[in-house]
Amino acid sequence: MDAATTKTIADLIALAGLGLTVLVVSAAMRRRLLVPLGVFAVVFFIGSQVTGLLASPPERGMGNLQKIMYVHVPAAWSFMIAFFIVMVASVLYLWRRQDRYDRVAAAAAEAGAVLTGLALMQGMTWGKPTWGVWWAWGDPRILFTAVVFLIYVGYIALRAFTEDEERRARWSAAVGIVGAINVPIVYGSVRWWRTIHQPQSTPSTVDPAYVIGLRLNAYAFLFLLLFFIALRYRAARAGDVADRILEERALNEETANV
Amino acid sequence: MSSPWPTGTGTDAATVAVQPAPEGLRVELARIGAVAWKDLTIERRAKANFNAVAFLAGLILLLFGFAIGPDAESLRNTAAGVIWLTVLFSGVLSFNRSYEQEMEGGALDMLVLYPGDRRAIFVGKLLANLTFVLLVEAVLVPAAALLYNLSILRIALPLAGIVILGTLGFVTLGTFYAAMASRLRAREVLLPLLLFPMLIPLLVAAVEATNDMMTGNAMGNAGAWIRLLVVFDVIFVAASVIAFEYVIEE
């Protein structure tokens, strides 16, 4: 495949992916489409991984180590999307005071934290053979990812320790917004801190041979993320409904005994 | 004998109740001052708190000294980081307490019920905590200079500026997160868990600026780091003041 064909295919994937994203988002909002959505997300993910692994030649410098890119880079992109969703849902909650926005924020924070942890571990796995160390203090991206991971671990811990539901929603929305404000500040300051202490290596542009796999997997991770959020949202909702039914039943029994 | 309060007979209690709270910048400042003064008075009368935190700060400085070793050079090189970590570890103890003492007898509920803007509660507590931590630092920084053999007298003014800027951001977020953490069971671990990751840009900027200042590094970026501190302070004072309303409403 020559470079021009590859570029055309990559552009087509980008366009088709945008259309699919719209479909996936609307499917995620319907309870009955949850299982088909999950099947689609997993199948799409497997297909994208296989395509990425098979379609790309071994990289000149890194060899097959390059292939971690198809899980690492999409994980990093999608955790940023997840935390953006947390911020938007938190703002919407404080504005409209509807439980569903709180559930979306909580679901996105959990999925985002998992992806952030994944991106961290993958980054370390890649860093060990590349730089000879698991934790490269010279790489601002790993430092940024670690800080963001801890910010959202704090968010999840706050939710876990707050029992009153209304208070939990309100507090975590406030923490979600203040935390999101810090994300670009952390990014800038960590990058700046490193460039002062050690010259930054120039970011190598991605060869077109790898773009197709990367684009496919970016969408695969996005769809998985949306599926996870929808799944956690449904679970939280089902939990709330179950609590209400139990409460009602307990009240009815009490009156029956009297 | 005339009472300023509605007695229920004669004056119409309902018309008194709907009177709006007085407004205006001066009233607002008076409210903030009242909250800050109240917190500082409690602190002044129970000196034990300040003494304990100040001695803990000295102890942490000593512990870092033992951990880093007797080599004068490496002690001086790490001093800026050690000072700021000591500020964080000792200062974090004061934030939860500023709300805990309100819990007794439901004082916080009363405070929230008072007429006027609730932001005044936040800003008042922020000022009280800022005063407290700055006073601890007034002991801690000279102690660090003694222990680590730093010459800080010639840079006293710019150093004080960096300390004040760094402390403002630290205390702002500390007071904000403590409003939540202090009301939960796991307050001791939850507050640092929420607060410290948020402070990393501030820590980096404060340590770098302090270091450049102390080593007299002309090639350093002290000015740029101080600008980062100012930006951090402005953003998070504004964000916390706005977000506090949602935290305190019950």
Image: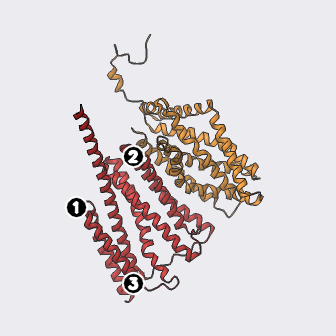
Q: Which chain is red?
A: A
The first of marks 1 and 3 along the sequence is 1
**Label drawn at residue A168:** 2
Relative to B51, residue B222 above or below? below
Badge 3 marks a residue whose secondary structure is helix
The location of residue A250, given as percent across then percent down, is 27, 40
Q: CA distance from mark 1 to mark 3?
A: 35 Å
Relative to B76, residue A124 above or below? below
The residue singled out by tag 1 in the image is A32
Q: CA distance from mark 3 to mark 2?
A: 47 Å
Between B139 and A41, the one nearer to me in the picture: A41
Measuring 63% from the left and 43% from the top, which residue is drawn there?
Answer: B134
Q: Are marks 1 and 3 in contact (CB under 8 Å)?
A: no
* Of marks 1 and 2, the one in the foreground: 1
Relative to B149, residue B138 above or below? above
State left or right for residue A209 relative to residue B104.
Answer: left
Label 2 marks a residue whose chain is A
Q: Residues within 10 Å of mark 3 (few under 14, many from 20)?
A: few
The location of residue A46, given as percent across then percent down, is 35, 75
State left or right for residue B96 relative to residue A155.
Answer: right
State left or right for residue B76 relative to residue A8.
Answer: right
Counting the numbered discs, the total is 3
The residue singled out by tag 3 in the image is A54
Q: Residues within 10 Å of mark 1 (few under 14, many from 20)?
A: few
The location of residue A40, given as percent across then percent down, is 28, 70
